Image (spheres, rainbow, N blue to C red):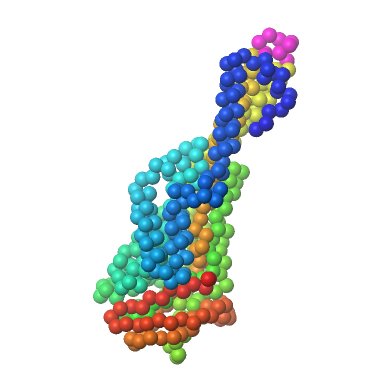
Amino acid sequence: MILSPCFIPWVSNLRRFGFALVLCGLALIQAGCVSEGTTSSKLGTPSPRDRVLLQYQQAGDALRRGQHAEAKSLLDDALLTLGGLSAGDRSAKQARGLFREESRKNFRGEPYERVMAYYYRGIIYWMEGEPDNARACFRSAQIQDSDAESNEYQADYVLLDYLDGMASTKLAGDGSDAFKRASQVARFAKPPAYDPQSNVLLFAEMGSGPVKYAAGEYREQLKFTPGQSRAVAAILSVGPATIHAAAYDDLSFQATTRGGRQMDHVLANKAVFKGAASGLGDAALISGAILATQSGRRSGLDEAGVGLLVAGLIFKGISAATTPTADTRAWTTLPNLLGFGAGRFAPGSYSGTLTFVDAGGTVTRTRPLRFDVVKDRDTVLFASDRD
């Protein structure tokens, strides 16, 4: 805030105590201006509070490059940290305060982002021949997806339940309940019945995921721009044999149906407080200015005017220091659609073609794919239509 030149004659006549209060008000205003949006990550220097976000993104990129060991290490570290943050995080508590931005808390991610960290880790477990641990990851992902106000959209990923049941079936267990849940929440095609003898599993991802942005008068509302995907399925062709990995889950749908968060209410209250403090400050400054102009006519108006000016500055400083801005840090490399398919292959080495197609069957991308199938262990393939 910049003081109008009209205030200068009055400020020069303030007594020492009043002058000190004005300085406090100006200091609060300065603190507010500095605190809004000056995180180290925005200035290009990675911040410790962004560590989990960076690990998420690096792990996803490594998985797409086929660097599974690197992705595994990054996800293990991120999920270990996530577990600690879920148990209690001082920075999250501080972010609920009036004068601390939400983006200054340690990044955990929205439910759909946390789900994807567990989903990717489950895929890697299955690649390593550990479907039991993969199932545990898919179940943990469902728990993350339960973080929503509306029961209608809790734990409604098709693939998390479907893969849970498939792993149980392969481990000689009963996956029927999980399959039933997956079928009930399917928004696209219904998933096929389990084939316990399928030994080549194709995980496919397509398009670019949702984008976060802040809306509202004080940018206190977290909103999402839906992602896009031209491809809706991946098809692996090896001679006459094919595996069709249809899309079953939509991350844009997941992001936009979560309902409110606890921080949504906190930020809404911050916005109300910020607006009220600014309004009180404006009223006090205007009233103080009026009284100060009349101080030559009636005794005592000078002191009253000065007091209101001081109060106005303090209220404006408090308003400036209040930070209701929503946290828009995001895992920006996520896909929009998740697909899956499975098939039977005899042990051996294979060269095939992986094709991504749109809803009309038009090819959007093609690439060669080579893989090996061994006895008594599933071959898990991961494919993205992005580089």
* Region in magenta: 294-302
What secondary structure is the stretch in magenta mostly built from?
loop
Q: Which residue is at the front of the view, 280 or 57?
A: 57
| Residue 193 appears in view | no
Looking at the image, residue 169 sits to the left or right of residue 234; the answer is left
Residue drawn at point x = 57 percent, y = 35 percent: 32
Tally of numbered tags? 0
Residue drawn at point x = 67 percent, y = 31 percent: 2
| Residue 61 appears in view | yes
Asked if residue 218 is positioned above or below residue 223 in the image, the reply reads above
Residue 121 position, x and y percent, is 37, 65
Asked if residue 209 is positioned above or below residue 286 in the image, the reply reads below
Residue 260 position, x and y percent, is 48, 50
Q: Quadrant of residue 144?
A: bottom left
Residue drawn at point x = 33 percent, y = 72 percent: 128
Q: Residue furthest bottom?
A: 240
Q: Residue furthest top?
A: 299
Residue 69 position, x and y percent, is 37, 67
Residue drawn at point x = 45 percent, y = 64 percent: 60
Q: Was residue 141 drawn as part of the magenta stretch in this picture?
A: no
Q: Residue furthest left?
A: 172
Asked if residue 18 is positioned above or below residue 95 in the image, the reply reads above
